[in-house]
Amino acid sequence: MVAATAVAAACLLAFPGAVPRTAGRPDSLVVTFLPWLGLLLPVLLVAARLRRSALALLALLLPAGVWLARYGGEPPEPPATGPGVITVVQHNAADDNRDPAGTARALTRARPRLIALQELTTAALPAYRAVLAPGYPYHAVHGTVGLWSAYPLRDVRPLDIRPPGFGPDWNRGLRATALTPYGRTAVHVVHLPSVRLRPATGLDSAARDAAAARLGAAIAAEPEERLLLLGDLNATAGDPGLAPVTTRLRPAPQRLAFSRPAALPVARIDQVLARSATVLGIRPLPATGSDHLPVAATIRLRP
């Protein structure tokens, strides 16, 4: 029994895409919590030792090896300096954040060149602008998403990712062209719809998946060769619902850089992805007044 469970865990870790995409989206649920399957390994190890089963101990090497290859074998975080290398920060700042000024100051400590924010409110916006203006003189806001940049911004416009049935007041996407020293770079800042876990029917991700499809179409139509996507995608990077996006962009390495909930992070739904650039690494930053942790990504813009 222990050996069979170990082999099953190894297969799930190695081939999460084999989980069928049916009603209730079990495939999305499995991918979201897949890293936590590693907690099963110590339990199986104890059971194998109690049974004194050499076969079970040997079988445990399979899931342990796959888990380490997927999540434990990343190289150290690369330096944030070097030719063509910049840092960017992505943060859902939360619309109930009581300290937007403190949040803005905290984000600047990572010395990013770009800062993307979601859940901006009219009341909090002046605080973000005041704190970020000295280091980030160029910024754009559309609806509840915003981008602050150390580089000039051009061609700023809304990015319509509204799912069917969502009204015109739902504005959670913008695009801009950042004029970096390494060339023009399109930047998309988005906030996909939330998902709901319902006891009777499972995961309800229809709105998020529809928005992801529209975002994927916008990425395909983006005329700039180099593109950065920064956003709260309400999904882990391996979620099949994000396939229209992730099949067109290069994700960050699979590090255990969880971002939500801030008090006890269990998954990273705040993402940084790229086209014609490389996301070298991603890491969570200290908590702010949000229920998300900020994430900082190191990106090589120059080939």
Image: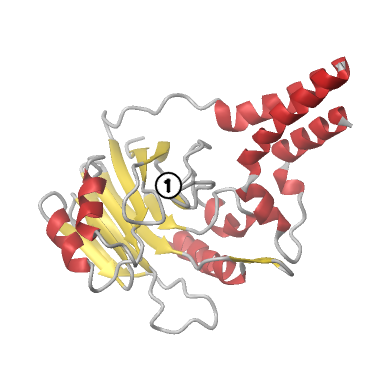
Rate crowding at label 1 as few (under 14), some (14 to 19) or many (20 or more) other CA atoms within 10 Å: many
Q: Spot the residue most to the front.
A: 50
Residue at 28% in and 35% down: 84
Q: Quadrant of the N terminus?
A: top right
Q: Which residue is mark 1?
A: 274
Q: Amino acid at mark 1?
A: Ala
Q: Spot the residue most to the left.
A: 134
Q: Is residue 137 visible?
A: no
Q: Position of residue 158 (x, y in %)?
A: 34, 71
Report the side of 202 relative to 141 (left or right): right
Q: Secondary structure at mark 1?
A: strand
Report the side of 105 relative to 95 (left or right): left
Report the side of 90 relative to 3 (left or right): left
- Residue 72's place in the image compared with 289, above or below, is above
Residue at 51% in and 37% down: 256
- Residue 132's place in the image compared with 209, above or below, is above
